[in-house]
Image: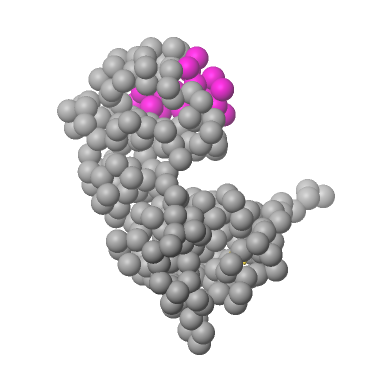
Amino acid sequence: MAGGRSAAARAPTRGATPAARAPQTLERLRALHPDAHCELVHRDAFELLVATVLSAQSTDTMVNAVTPALFARYPDAATLARADVAEVERALARLGMFRQKARNVVGLARGLVERHGGEVPRTLAALIELPGVGRKTANVVLGVAFAAPEGVVVDTHVLRLAQRLGWTRQRDPEGVERALCRLLPRETWDVASHTLIFHGRRLCTAVKPACAACPLSDGACPSAFRAELVGRKPPRARAR
Ligand code: SF4
């Protein structure tokens, strides 16, 4: 736990709605996960951008297992833009959807070279124009590499936590992002997503969340001890 935060930040604020308490609840989560950070290993904005594109439907651990060899062979946008896609496929073969991902990252590198001189642009509008880059990837790069996020990164953990914590009833990522941007101070947007992802991976898991071990079960979290069906995709109906 971080020792520098005030007791007031750690105590639940009674009387306000969970959404109104979101900044204080985030402070408590930051105290619980003071080391929350982007877990994709990277040395610069280019590597982070490529790693984030590769992380779709793959764990950060799997992405971190393939990127050292990939970036040793293709250290920048110029070399990756000239790559043989079949060779890139071989480098990514341990990832799901590796063929599509190989095409995506080579196309992305070509976009960086053709439109931005091989550099990673620093605005959301320019990033989401690049092949394979959506709001989530763009905000990861803007927040982590440039400390200038234009929104909150909403992945599956952030989506689930925002609903369980009673911060929003929105169910789609863009609606959740808008809600979080309204509720949380801008200077916390980047750390908020890392903190929620850490909490979602370590305690507030999709299945069997560890409410008994979670400090927010003291009244701060409206879903405590009944969370398993909150913020999860509904089970698919069986075909008859
Ligand atoms: S009390 Fe339970 S549902 Fe609420 S944040 Fe903690 S682990 Fe998640």
Q: Quadrant of residue 52?
A: top left
What are the residue bounds of the magenta stretch? 89-107
Provide residue 83's location: percent of width, then percent of height: 35, 14
Residue at left offset 60%, top offset 77%: 219
Residue at left offset 61%, top offset 74%: 218
Taking the magenta stretch, the answer to whether it contains residue 101 is: yes
Q: Is residue 176 visible to us here?
A: no
Q: Quadrant of residue 9?
A: bottom left
Q: Is residue 1 left or right of residue 110?
A: right
Provide residue 207's location: percent of width, then percent of height: 69, 54
Q: Is residue 116 left or right of residue 60?
A: left
Nearer to the camera, 49 or 169: 49
Nearer to the camera, 57 or 99: 57
Q: Is residue 230 visible to us here?
A: yes
Q: Is residue 186 left or right of residue 94?
A: left
Task: Report the residue that reaches farthest toward the bottom.
Answer: 15
Provide residue 114's location: percent of width, then percent of height: 21, 27
Task: Report the residue that reaches farthest toward the right.
Answer: 240
Residue at left offset 58%, top offset 49%: 201
Total marks drawn?
Answer: 0
Looking at the picture, does residue 224 appear above or below residue 201?
below
Residue at left offset 37%, top offset 21%: 71
Taking the magenta stretch, the answer to whether it contains residue 95 is: yes
For the stretch drawn in magenta, what is the main secondary structure?
A: helix
Provide residue 84's location: percent of width, then percent of height: 38, 12
